[in-house]
Image: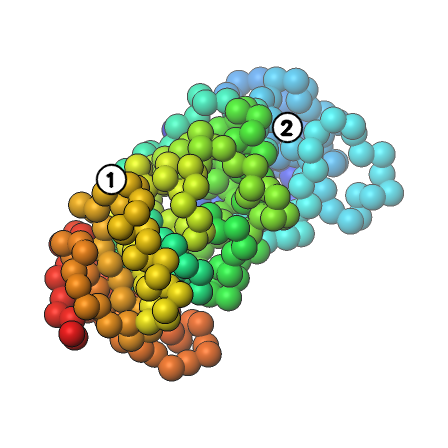
Amino acid sequence: MKVKLFIATVDVLYAKLISDNISEHHAGKIEVSTCSTPEGLNDAISKQKNDVALIDAVLIEYADISRVKLPLLLWSETDTDKALPDGPEKINKHQRISSIVASILEQFAKVSGNSYSADSKQARITAVWSPAGGVGKTSVSLAYALSCAAEDKEVFYLSLENFLSTSCYLSGNGKSISTAFEMLEKHDGNLKMLIQGISCKDKGITFLCAPENYDDMCILSCENVRELVTTCAELSDELVIDLSSACDPRVREVFELTDNVLLVTDPSPVTCTKLTQFITQNNVFENIKEKVTLVANKGAIIHEAVTNSMISLPLIQSNDTNEVCRALSKTASINCSSNISQVQTTFPV
């Protein structure tokens, strides 16, 4: 199902620009029609079943907006001296069309309930985790995501770390993931549509921007995490989840949902000690062992196989995070041409 968007504006050139852009870049989400006269506006509202009406200030006084599920006011700075009507949410026409689309989907997600259902995918879910911080989880996560994107997969990268470093690798000006957290907490609205609206895309990877506040991530419940992960999985072929180094109930919830777990280690004694403790003393490992791939990063040497599959990554000397990520993504070990849990490599003793 697509959102039926009706745009009413006296600016005919603007109507054509936004309509053409949506038809070209967002046709899978939105079906758009336009008009530029009060007569056309009233005819469309009375006869068409539109989900959203985006109406400029000049025409909105002629519209019976009560007949539209979500009326929105299209305005610009030149309208500030006029008496704008109360009620409808306002959207500034002078911004990126992708931002306008995001705002439309975000607003409609809040009022549409669960009646809206986009075409669903079912991603293969890969979680990247380590009991120690600083081992390169995010680099491994994004290297794997990049290699999947290179295979023409729809890739979604979801960071559930307490403190995110996503902006060091990916660029985007979408709304914060906190918007999704708010909907999860209220259990109200269509989360899938909201995520489609607020997500960004860079280097072929779809992702969500950092929380507005650290505490926003902390209040997520296991139920929230499950709903967030399963929703993102419906929007992609490959879902890559970058986890924090804790082994709390939320991380274990993700482990249950995943097809693969990339367990990252490095050569440091601290990491080796923590990894040994996790493997030998924690029953969580026994529950996920069959889907674990041990990733030896930063030149780590593996002395003994503890899982059925392992990956050895090269030591890359660079302070450029994007360079490291790109280099790792091109190695034979990080790719999605086969099930990653079946990858076998030779390790130094």
Most foreground residue, 92 or 240: 240
- In which quarter of the view is residue 326 placed? bottom left
Most foreground residue, 94 or 270: 270
Can you see residue 253? yes
Q: Position of residue 264 (x, y in %)?
A: 32, 60
Please determine whether, in this image, residue 140 is positioned above or below residue 35: below
Q: Position of residue 109 (x, y in %)?
A: 53, 30
Q: Give amino acid for label 1.
A: Asn
Q: Position of residue 319 (x, y in %)?
A: 46, 79
- In which quarter of the view is residue 8 placed? top right
Can you see residue 29? no
Q: Give amino acid for label 2.
A: Pro
Number of residue marks: 2
Q: Give the secondary structure at mark 1.
A: helix
Neighbours of disc 2 within 10 Å: few (<14), some (14-19), many (20+): many
Q: Residue under circle 2?
A: 71
Look at 59% across and 30% down and name the residue there: 53
Residue 217 tag number:
none
Q: Residue under circle 1?
A: 287
- Left or right of 327 in this view: 38: right
Neighbours of disc 1 within 10 Å: few (<14), some (14-19), many (20+): few
As measured in the structure, the alpha-carbon distance from the residue carrying label 1 to the one carrying label 2 is 50 Å
Look at 33% across and 53% down and name the residue there: 277
> Which quadrant holds the N terminus?
top left
Q: Position of residue 13 (x, y in %)?
A: 60, 49
- In which quarter of the view is residue 130 placed? bottom left
Among the two numbered marks 1 and 2 on one chain, the one whose residue lies closer to the N terminus:
2
Most foreground residue, 217 or 251: 251
Look at 63% across and 28% down and name the residue there: 71
Look at 26% across and 50% down and name the residue there: 280
